[in-house]
Image (tube, rainbow, N blue to C red):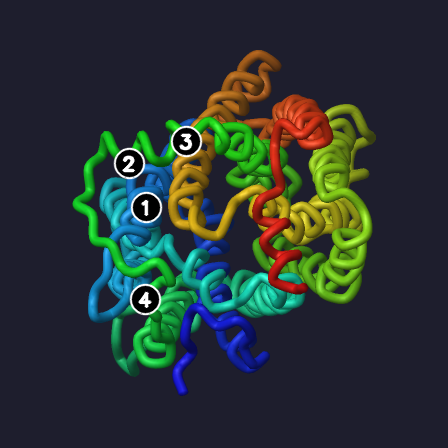
């Protein structure tokens, strides 16, 4: 029997199988981080330019991903309503990503990045499909499965592939001139995983018509904006969704450059540190975060996660700026990464509770529409934050005379991150007061509790 949406309870084998697309999506997200930054660095050296091209993937969140999520609520085909977007989007992104490490110049690379992110965001409706397969009563435990599976992908990504990014494996064919490098392998492995996820969705998953029947509506951009943003109930939830981005998005592009170019780590060392962090994440931080998330206020935990990561990274900036020469060694970086790296303790806590937190405030019949709003908010916020980060690093370096010979203080991004985190914590506290006063209702959480009784 194929995996089918709309079930009141599902076998755990179904839940485990639904992790495969999350693994492919996480790999794609990882590709858009350090590897893409290193590939761009071959053709560009100005932080603002690197940030702009890195933010193209975020821009497509609100130009394509939001529309895909919205339309997927309002169509019905023989393939269902979410699956067509996933099959087309993932097939396209897999084919395009094969060509990215082969780009001969910056403008070809920029065009390929644009195409890659376009197709990736066409496939944005996976989360609504996932939530239609996994009933509310089982989403908490499947969240742990999701975290473990994506962490395992990260371990392979960093510990096996990223550490070999600069390695040359020699000619691909005997007597040939094409030199196979680790850079090629990391992108091509992502293409293979994405194609496997596409086949899984095409062959093993079926969508049942929604309980209220299928309604096909013609897409109108003005109606899209009205449906997604006219209902003021979602405005504070959209703002809450953006808060965790303030603690990491602006810094994402420049963390790899801080560690490799400013501190002097090799890409193999960088990948090794990421691997150590993810192992600690898998063994300690994910179980601990899951335990805390069910016993304490998720809003308070989110504030702790945002503030903790920003404070640790600000300390790294201070050590690099004012500490003794050579003090920031690989062991120090490991310590920083364990708490505030992309898989570190505070970041792990943030990502584990982010989804459950915001979906507590969304009723089931608005998942696709509000997910479209999340995509729009994510895209706009991410695009602005990454480009703000590029301008900040460039401007800060020039003001402090560290860019006189095109040497940039990439770690200055942590100062901006800290300022943004303070604003995010302030809003979380304001949101918390509104919930306590009854101005915002936890509709999603209420539905989950009802389904369990």
Q: Nearer the viewer, residue 220 or 444?
A: 444
Residue 159 in which image quadrant? bottom right
| Residue at numbered disc 3 | 380
Query: Of tags 3 and 4, which is closer to the observer?
Result: 4
Q: Check if mark 2's residue and mark 3's residue have beta carbons within 8 Å.
A: no
Residue located beneath label 1 in the image: 70
How far, Cα to Cα, is label 1 from label 2? 7 Å
How far is mark 2 from mark 3, CA to CA?
16 Å
Q: Which residue is mark 4?
A: 209
Secondary structure state at the residue bearing disc 2: helix
Q: Which mark is residue 8?
A: none
Say whether marks 3 and 4 touch (CB < 8 Å): no
- Marks 3 and 4 sit apart, C-alpha to C-alpha, by 32 Å
- Category of crowding for the residue at label 2, using alpha-carbon neighbours closer than 10 angstroms: few (below 14), some (14–19), many (at least 20): some
Query: x and y percent of residue 231 in the render?
Result: 42, 30
To which residue does mark 2 refer? Answer: 224
């Amino acid at each position: 029997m194929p995996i089918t949406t709309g079930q009141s309870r599902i076998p755990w084998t179904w839940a485990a199988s639904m992790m495969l697309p999350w693994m492919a999506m996480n790999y794609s997200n990882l590709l858009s981080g350090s590897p893409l930054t290193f590939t761009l660095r071959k053709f560009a050296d100005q932080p603002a330019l690197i940030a702009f091209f890195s933010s193209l993937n975020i821009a497509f969140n609100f130009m394509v991903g939001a529309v895909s999520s919205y339309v997927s609520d309002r169509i019905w085909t023989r393939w269902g309503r979410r699956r067509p977007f996933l099959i087309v989007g993932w097939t396209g992104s897999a084919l395009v990503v094969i060509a990215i490490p082969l780009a001969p110049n910056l403008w070809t690379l920029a065009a390929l990045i644009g195409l890659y992110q376009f197709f990736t965001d066409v496939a944005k409706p996976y989360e609504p499909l996932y939530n239609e397969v996994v009933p509310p009563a089982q989403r908490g435990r499947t969240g742990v499965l999701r975290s473990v599976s994506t962490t395992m992908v990260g371990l392979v990504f960093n510990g096996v592939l990223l550490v070999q990014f600069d390695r040359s494996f020699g000619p691909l064919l005997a007597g040939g001139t094409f030199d196979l490098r680790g850079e090629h392998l990391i992108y091509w492995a992502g293409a293979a995983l994405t194609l496997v996820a596409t086949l899984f969705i095409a062959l093993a998953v079926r969508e049942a018509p929604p309980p209220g029947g299928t309604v096909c509506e013609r897409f109108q951009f003005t109606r899209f904006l009205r449906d997604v943003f006219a209902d003021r109930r979602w405005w504070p939830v959209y703002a809450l969704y953006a808060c965790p981005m303030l603690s990491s998005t602006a810094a994402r592009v420049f963390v790899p450059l801080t560690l490799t170019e400013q501190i002097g780590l090799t890409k193999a060392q960088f990948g090794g540190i990421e691997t150590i962090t993810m192992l600690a994440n898998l063994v300690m931080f994910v179980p601990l975060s899951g335990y805390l998330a069910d016993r304490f206020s998720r809003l308070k935990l989110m504030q702790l996660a945002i503030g903790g990561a920003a404070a640790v990274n600000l300390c790294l900036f201070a050590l690099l700026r004012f500490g003794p020469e050579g003090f920031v060694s690989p062991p120090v970086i490991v310590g920083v990464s364990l708490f505030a790296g992309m898989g570190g303790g505070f970041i792990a806590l943030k990502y584990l509770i982010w989804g459950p937190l915001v979906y507590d405030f969304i009723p089931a019949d608005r998942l696709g529409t509000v997910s479209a709003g999340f995509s729009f908010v994510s895209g706009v916020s991410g695009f602005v934050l990454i480009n703000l980060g590029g301008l900040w690093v460039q401007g800060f370096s020039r003001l402090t005379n560290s860019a006189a010979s095109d040497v940039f203080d990439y770690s200055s991004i942590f100062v901006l991150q800290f300022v943004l985190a303070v604003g995010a914590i302030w809003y979380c506290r304001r949101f918390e007061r509104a919930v306590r006063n009854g101005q915002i209702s936890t509709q999603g959480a209420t539905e989950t509790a009802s389904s369990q009784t």
